[in-house]
Amino acid sequence: MGTYTPAGWPAGVHPPGSEDFESTAVGWLLDVVPPDYRLHGVLRRYPVALATIARYHARACVEGARQGYRTARTELAGALPPHAIDTVLAAYRKEGARLAATARAVGLVERGLRGEVFTPETDQPAAGELPGGTRARASGGPRRVRGNGSGGERASGVSSAPELAEPAGISSDRGDSDLATT
């Protein structure tokens, strides 16, 4: 079996097909989810189940950070000085990027646990996708998600949908965030 791992593969997790892949994947995934999940032996026995839980958890973390970023100025106005709010937003951007990278890595590990074999050729974006999983429009630009009807959308068209899009994270009103929903 090959030892190729795609971009974004988590450090410390051995490649799929290697002798220690499953044990290193389980250890890493247990670090992604809340600590009490370690109490459930079924998740160690069935790593795909653990990966599925980790995927939902990581996506929820990204979405929570997106929502917090979108509402921080309004929620914190009057309670914090403007420079502190800017610092909070910077923290959201930084941590949002980390959370988004973790969510992408969880997806890769889950695919490996499900038996997918990674090669440099499979690491290329699928037809109609840009690197990182963003869907491309006919005009060539990334597709902006317009919302899910939950009322959580802003006028800028940023959605509160849980899907991850490149670069997957929190969006800013200026669109300069490393974490913009596209």
Image (tube, rainbow, N blue to C red):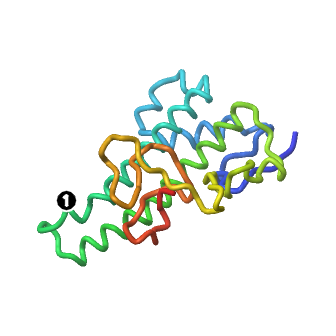
Other-residue count near label 1 (Cα within 10 Å), few / some / many at <14 / 14–19 / ≥20 = few
> Percent position (x, y) of residue 40?
47, 24
In the foreground, 105 or 124: 124
Residue visible at 24% across and 74% down in the picture: 84
Q: Which residue type does callout 1 highlight?
A: Glu
Task: Judge left or right: residue 116 versus residue 56.
Answer: right
Q: Residue at x 72, y 39 (%)?
A: 21
Residue 5 appears at what percent x and percent y? Answer: 76, 50
Who's the residue at 55% across and 31% down the image?
A: 50
List the single residue furthest toward the left: 78
Which residue corresponds to the image point at 49% horizontal and 61% vertical from the top-left? 97
Quadrant assignment for the N terminus: top right
**Farthest residue in the right direction?**
1
Q: Residue furthest bottom?
A: 83
The part of the image, by quadrant, that contains residue 177 is bottom left
Residue 98, percent from left and from top = 50, 58
Residue 24 in the image: above or below residue 69: above
Numbered label tally: 1
Q: Is residue 54 left or right of residue 110?
A: left
Q: Which residue is mark 1?
A: 75
Horizontal side of 180 relative to 45 (left or right) equals: left
**Can you give x and y, in whole percent of width and height, for residue 58 in the image?**
48, 44
